[in-house]
Amino acid sequence: MESMYFNEEHQLFRESLRDFLKKEVVPHIDKWEKTGTIERFIWEKFGEMGYFGLAYPEEYGGMDLDLFYTVILLEELQRINSGGFAAAIWAHVYLAMTHLNKEGNHEIKQKYLAPSITGEKIGCLCITEPFGGSDVAGMRTTAVKKGDKYIINGSKTFITNGVYSDYLVIAAKTNPELGNKGISIFVLDREMPGISATKLEKLGWKASDTGEIAFDNVEIPLENLMGEENKGFAYIMQHFALERLIMGVNAHARAEFAMEYAIQYMSERQAFGRSIDKFQALRHTMADLAAELEVCKTFNYTVAYRLNKGEYVVKEATISKLQSTKMSDNVIYQCLQMLGGYGYMEEYPMARLFRDSRLGPIGGGTSEILREIIAKMIIDKKDYKPAT
């Protein structure tokens, strides 16, 4: 445990959370992985325990705790070996709810944020489009003002919680001629006429529902606009720092879980008269992996510390996701190899870990896009600014 970042209260929280997940979540994971549907009761239990309100204001039922409680939540969610379940939780808490908290007015927070904290409502964030991918500025979904309403048309894809959520936080162009300076953020109720969703089948993250969503002349009140009109791109960019750090933390926690399992397996697996953790080639491979993991983990904690202080860590969070997801893929690939044929079997955890980890370098901005963002900052001297 990194004592410079985690105190005794953090440690007690970790222990209680780990116990909760073991008792309340783990028994259902295999079922949810098969059905692709996370039952509603667990959302309410998370709400009862206060896990959805860790980072949110007390005024709306949250606890307003420091960011390292969030780090602990993310790390422990990776230890139950369901990237899909973990994604459904953090996409609700730190994607949809972040926008509600930062851009929503008091009425929106009362209507959506408060019940999100209790687990009564589930949210999703809709940015990615079928033709856009990581090109946020190139989105085609539009929101045209008409009297006292906006009319929304377009589509979004790869949306976590995109099928079963109760509300959608979406980005749409209110002024297409302005490019990325013409994007706005809205909140929509699922039952609004004109919204339809199709569930997508995935390589991994099987427990989460990932959807493609269509908006066909969806009418929403003007008050469903969040923040200022045409400021959406700046809001999205500002929150990407948290999203990318989250995926970096997920990656180091996932890799750590894989390494713990592989090392335990190696200590029990016998070959040529001794346990395989005594063979130098395997030992040195694990040593290299542990070193890569520790570098990423320590860096991620440093970025979390700075973000917690309010610093604008867009470069550091981008590096966190780029390096940590690459590391995690490598670590889990090598750990699966340590299990030999058993690593390829579904009854062992490494096959699911392997599938789930592969999304890391893709979701939330591909590694290729992240490298270009970093290149713009270090070569072109581009200075990204927080939303004002």
Image (tube, rainbow, N blue to C red):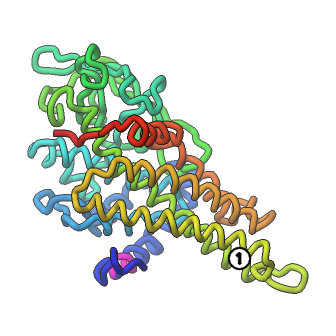
Q: In this view, does 206 lie to the left or right of 176?
A: right
Query: Is residue 44 shown in magenta?
Result: no
Residue found 30% across the figure and 39% down from its top: 383
Residue 61 place in picture, x, y as percent? 16, 61
- Pointer 1: what residue? 265
Image quarter of the N terminus: bottom left
Residue 332: in sight, yes or no? yes
Q: Is residue 314 left or right of residue 230?
A: right
**Whether residue 263 is situated above or below residue 74 in the rendered picture:** below
Q: Which residue lies furthest to the right in this view?
A: 272
Q: In which quarter of the image is residue 59?
A: bottom left
Residue 350 place in picture, x, y as percent? 66, 62
Residue 159: in sight, yes or no? no
Residue found 42% across the figure and 51% down from its top: 88
Tag 1: amino acid = Tyr
Residue found 42% across the figure and 62% down from its top: 300
Residue found 55% across the figure and 66% down from its top: 293
Q: Which residues are drawn in magenta?
A: 12-16
Residue 111 place in picture, x, y as percent? 16, 45
Principal SS element in the magenta part? helix
**Whether residue 24 is situated above or below residue 307 in the rendered picture:** below
